[in-house]
Amino acid sequence: MLIFSIDDEPLLNTASLRIIREAVPDAEVLTFLRGSDALKTIQENNLRPDIVFSDIQMPGLNGLEFAVKLKTLCPSAKIVFVTGYSEYALDAFKIHAQGYILKPLEADRVREEIAHSFPPPAAASDKLHVQCFGYFDVTWQGQPLTFARRKTKELFAFLIDREGTACTMEDISSALYENEQDLKVTKNRIRVLINDLKSTLSKIRMENVLIRQSGWVAIRRELVDCDYYKMLDGDMHAVSSFAGDYMQQYTWAELTAGKLYLRYIQR
């Protein structure tokens, strides 16, 4: 395992190196004082870190900006932010951060993040099967998953489309209720849908697919067997099965459909 550690404070950088080596003694660990130095190393030496522990508040390229550039170069790399500022948590999840640790860094927390980032692969029977190509549909152990509300299914589709990104009430409202002007009304509707989705997943004991926090909701991407995700991960069978149609019943999915068409069809 290759681990990067980034902190602009030299003493904390040295301490992080010691703690990570204590937590993961078999890993190769490289430290950097700047995110730009880590990106340069990736490009010049063709390195692909498995996981990166990064500070957020740094001069020049901050941690959030670094994470966006890292995902472009290394889509599979996991990033865990290590910071003294809790107010960045939502922004971190919006850019697919794997974890968020408040300083000081401790070996136990590093081990927890490693275990969470690289869990044992789940058996196919332990995952929800999600179809995004064509019309959106969900099956569980070979049977269609029944949603009590049509909008609940659409909410789940929207969370799938966002690939595990934290979605606020405003994000969901703009997609599912684009013509509704009263945000207070739509927020109440969305709360009902979230509760309904949780109940639906609980019936098949898959409620852990849903991540619900104050002000936002997301899905755990790794617990879903999805044609869209497989294509993004480079699965050639999934790529070849994509004919340009994506979640056809939802107008808000047209943006993603267009991006996929330009990337995989019109090449």
Image: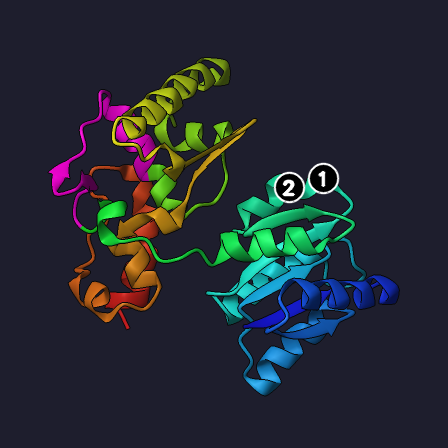
- Picture residue at 71% right of the left edge, 75% below the top: 37
Residue that badge 1 annotates: 86
Residue 14: horizontal and vertical position, in percent? 81, 68
Question: Tag 1's secondary structure?
Answer: helix
In percent of width and height, residue 260 lies at: 31, 59
Query: Image quadrant of residue 150?
Result: top left
Give amino acid for label 2. Answer: Ala
Residue 37 vertical placement versus 59 (above, below): below
Along the viewing direction, whichever of 197 and 135 lies nearer the viewer: 197
Disc 2 on helix, strand or loop? helix
**Front in this rendered view, residue 154 or 181:** 154
Q: Which residues are magenta?
A: 134-157
| Residue at the extreme bottom | 45
In this orientation, which residue lies closer to the viewer: 47 or 110?
110
Numbered circles on residues, count: 2
Name the residue rendered at 62%, 64% in the picture: 52
Q: Quadrant of residue 235?
A: bottom left
Q: Is residue 81 visible?
A: no
Q: Relative to 216, does residue 39 appear above or below in the rendering?
A: below
Residue type at mark 1: give it: Ser
- Left of 107 or right of it: where is 261? left
Please name the residue shown 86% across and 67% down the image: 10
Which numbered dot is residue 89? Answer: 2
Cβ–Cβ under 8 Å for marks 1 and 2 = yes
Question: Label 1 crowding class (10 Å Cα cut-off): few <14, some 14-19, many 20+?
Answer: few
| Magenta residue check for 100 | no
Q: Residue most toward the left?
A: 143
Side of 255 where 47 appears, left or right:
right
Q: Is residue 262 visible?
A: yes
Residue 149 lies in the magenta-colored region: yes
Gap in angstroms between the C-alphas marked 1 and 2: 6 Å
Q: Position of residue 126 (x, y in %)?
A: 27, 46
